[in-house]
Image: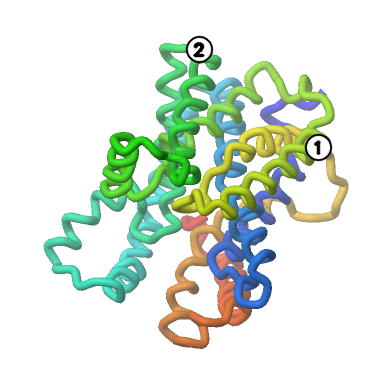
Amino acid sequence: MTSAKTRQYPAVDVMKFVCAFLVIVVHTYPFYEVWPDLGFVTSNILGRIVIPFFFISAGYFMQIGRCHKDENYFRSYIKRLIKLYLIWSVIYIPFGMHKLGSMMEISGALWLAALPIALFNIGTYFHLWYMSALIFAMVFCHLFLKKFSMKALLILGGVLFLFGLIETYHGLITNEILLQSVNTYFLLMFTTRNGLFFGVLFVALGMALADQNRVEAIRHPFAKAAAAFGLLVVEAFTVRHFHWALDYNMYLMTVPFILYWFAGLLRTRLDWKLNFKALRESSTVIYFCHAMFLELGEILLGSLYLTNGAVRFCFVFPLTMIMTAIIRKWLPFLK
């Protein structure tokens, strides 16, 4: 039998590539102008499964590495993530400066003061928050498990996630003191979409699935995922209808959907004649590099880019794929 550390997971690689494509859809929102409901589904439902999928996948494969390799595996894994994050953070500094500079006037001293805060929170450009969140969640889970059980980690992750849902269900808060406290948090931290409230639970779920091969114990994962997705759609449209959300980053039903969907993909074998490693690598590069074309499109095309979702997508997607091919072939340190 093939061991977990040598087994390939082609369905997961395909899903990662699909998720990378969805990231571009989320950030270009090509359908909103012509069909708002489709735009909502693609950007605020389908697009919101991307980061949880990346989190649970990272947690699963990191736990496999911790179980089957030496003690230094985790350290080297985190070092690689930090190195990648810092390289891309430097690349995106001018893009971030242009974005913020177009919205407000910021002095040079304030830029220098804001840089370390950005690195530890939202990143030097808006999409890089995921990397700082992933690194934090990975380190948090690793250190927590040195002292406590996996069950305790899952419970804590669930509690943190429930707190994070205040961004989605903000409109339900009626207590004045609680509302003021929550609003103060958002004034200081902007969002609950971070490693603590968003990342820990999904990374922990991935690690739990890898522990003692729990994937095989889940029966009919795709049927359960389909049911959870149906409830996710209902949840999202309900939140929109009642105007509860500050943003649509987190949904309660994302948790069972991602858990069962990922478990099903782990058990799926594909005989397709595809380079799955290339898909896996490309998904990472697409995520990192697509945002530069979001900014360049605004600079080069102006109002046409800003007001037409199809133009945004048709500008960003092909250039991102070209840049991805270039990076994979000639700039491997960026992947």
Q: Residue at x 55, y 39 (%)?
A: 55
Q: Is residue 217 visible?
A: yes
Mark nearer the viewer, 1 or 2: 1
Q: Residue furthest right?
A: 271
Q: Amino acid at mark 2?
A: Ser
Q: Position of residue 152 (x, y in %)?
A: 50, 15
Residue that badge 1 annotates: 222
Residue that badge 2 annotates: 149
Dot 1 or dot 2, earlier in sequence = 2
Compare residues 2 and 299 and report the one nearer the observer: 299
Q: Is residue 295 left or right of residue 287?
A: left
Residue 218 falls in image quadrant: top right
Q: Residue at x 70, y 27 (%)?
A: 4
Which mark is on residue 63? Answer: none
Q: Is residue 326 visible?
A: no
Rendered position, 107 above or below 75 = below
Q: Residue at x 29, y 52 (%)?
A: 118
